[in-house]
Image (tube, helix red, strand yellow):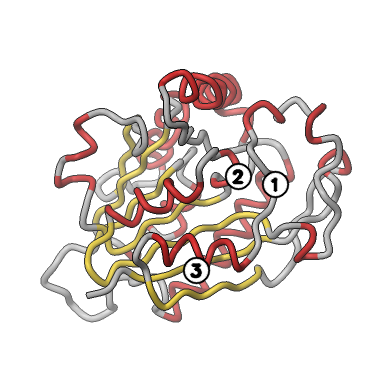
Amino acid sequence: MAHAHADHEQGHSHHEADDIGGRNKAHFDKLSVDLWNIPWIKALGGQITQELKKDAETGSLNTKPSSESTRTYRMLDYACGNGVISRALALCFDDIQGLDISPEMVDQYNKLAETSGLSDRMRATVGDLINGSDQLNALEYSGFDLIVMSMALHHVEDPVLMIRRLSERLAKGGVLLIIDWVSPAESGCRAFMGMHDHPTSHIVSRMGFERRELDAWFADAGLQSFTWRWAADRSSAPVEHGGDKQMFFARATRPL
């Protein structure tokens, strides 16, 4: 979620990775539990949850059919934070993996999974698909029916590479879903005010994306059947962030 997911720097050198990646990790480790008590962040989580549940009902998220299935349906929640996305879709998948660069966020994810009675189907690990360890190359982190990256792409230095890496982890026929802010030019919302002076400016690469960008990046990753939609309502954001914002939901599918 916005300023809620610890994100994964996509730099092409260890120096760059230590730069914004390290800043993201330190920032979100420090916030941890307190972040989810910020009223607008909590409201944003609720809004995203409702939007996802609507999508799940349409079948567009490649969720497990209501009829009995003989195979395990799997989801990856990337830059998972405390697990808002995972909990929203927990009953739609048999196995949900969370990945986040922040150990504190991973700890919160796993604690909430346990208190929600969902630890049998969702669990998080510290990890980064760009500068990650060898464990992320294991079968456990591939072949997903759905991968979601929510409110985290705006922290990423190289979104093209990020989307490519996520796409590589999809099963054939799997869906990649990116949730983030629509650019002010396209949404008509005010830009984030004073971004370079804001306390979180050091962990943000940009604020807002355009449809044509996501369409091109998904295509670059070899995905097809691209769709883009706006959230039904704008999201409330503080005045210091420029006020209300518009979310988008962009998805595409790995060919069979």
Q: Which residue in the protein does label 2 denote?
A: 154
Q: Label 1 vs label 2: CA separation?
A: 6 Å
Instruction: Establish if 64 lies above or below 4.
Output: below
Q: Earlier in the sequence, mark 1 or mark 3?
A: 3
- State the mark number for residue 53: 3
* Pointer 3 local density, CA inside 10 Å: few below 14, some 14–19, many at least 20: some
In what element is the residue under mark 1? loop
Q: Which residue in the protein does label 1 denote?
A: 207
Task: Name the side, left or right, on which 2 lies relative to 214.
Answer: right
The answer to whether the residues at label 1 and label 3 have Cβ atoms under 8 Å apart is: no
Q: Nearer the viewer, mark 1 or mark 3?
A: 1
The answer to whether the residues at label 1 and label 2 have Cβ atoms under 8 Å apart is: yes
Amino acid under disc 1: Met
Closer to the camera in the image, 15 or 149: 15
Instruction: Establish if 187 lies above or below 104.
Output: below
Instruction: Establish if 107 lies above or below 183.
Output: above
Which residue lies at the image location 75% right of the left edge and 66% below the top edge?
A: 186
Task: Name the side, left or right, on which 46 lies relative to 241.
Answer: left
Q: Earlier in the sequence, mark 3 or mark 2?
A: 3
Q: Which of marks 1 and 2 is nearer the N terminus?
A: 2
Which residue lies at the image location 44% right of the left edge and 63% below the top edge?
A: 218
Across and down, in percent, residue 246 comes to 73, 61
